Amino acid sequence: MGKLIEYQLAEGEKVVVEVADEGADEGLRPAGRGPAIAATTFEGALDAVMPAARSAVHRLKALAPDELALEFGIKFNTKAGAVIASTALEANLKVTLTWSPGARRTAGATE
């Protein structure tokens, strides 16, 4: 089992996240017998991956799909906050683009 880290939510609630970092205590405050307390908020940790998600969506929208789904795992790390999770040696990013037949009309088409 990894280390338990408690993050404060913007609304005042708290969430406990398991991280795999053994011996990595940077960015944590000791909390006695319970989980260590993160020095950043949960939202602050997620801010680390938001630019990557926005960038991917922006670039993929250029393909003009009718639907766009972007899925990626988020791994919490005591040093980096939140990072895009990996499987083996590659980052985990699943993209689904859908075009519906007949949903778009070509330029110059007549009715």
Image (spheres, grey):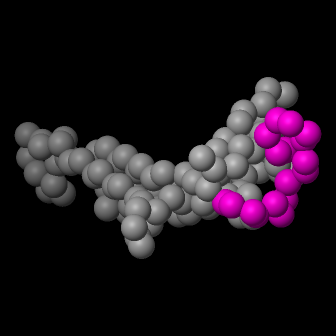
Region in magenta: 21-37
Identify the image quadrant of the C terminus: top left
Residue 74 vs residue 44: left or right? left
- In the displayed image of the protein, which residue is found farthest to the left? 111
Q: Which quadrant would residue 84 be assigned to in this image?
A: bottom right
Q: Nearer the viewer, residue 14 or 93?
A: 14
Q: Nearer the viewer, residue 94 or 1?
A: 1
Residue 99 vs residue 83: left or right? left
Q: Nearer the viewer, residue 94 or 24?
A: 24
Residue 35 x, y percent position in the rendering: 79, 40
Q: Nearer the viewer, residue 66 or 27?
A: 27
Find out whether residue 15 is within the magenta segment. Answer: no
Residue 70 vs residue 43: left or right? left
Find out whether residue 27 is within the magenta segment. Answer: yes
Q: Does residue 47 appear anywhere in the picture?
A: no
Report the residue at 29% width, 45% height from top. 66
Q: Is residue 78 above or below residue 4?
A: below
Residue 77 x, y percent position in the rendering: 67, 58
Report the residue at 81% width, 60% height from top. 25
Q: Is residue 92 above or below residue 37?
A: below
Q: Main secondary structure of the magenta part?
A: loop
Total of numbered circles in the picture? 0
Report the residue at 78% width, 35% height from top. 9
Report the residue at 46% width, 63% height from top. 86
Residue 45 x, y percent position in the rendering: 72, 52
Q: Does residue 60 appear anywhere in the picture?
A: yes
Residue 82 x, y percent position in the rendering: 65, 56
- In the displayed image of the protein, which residue is found farthest to the bottom? 89
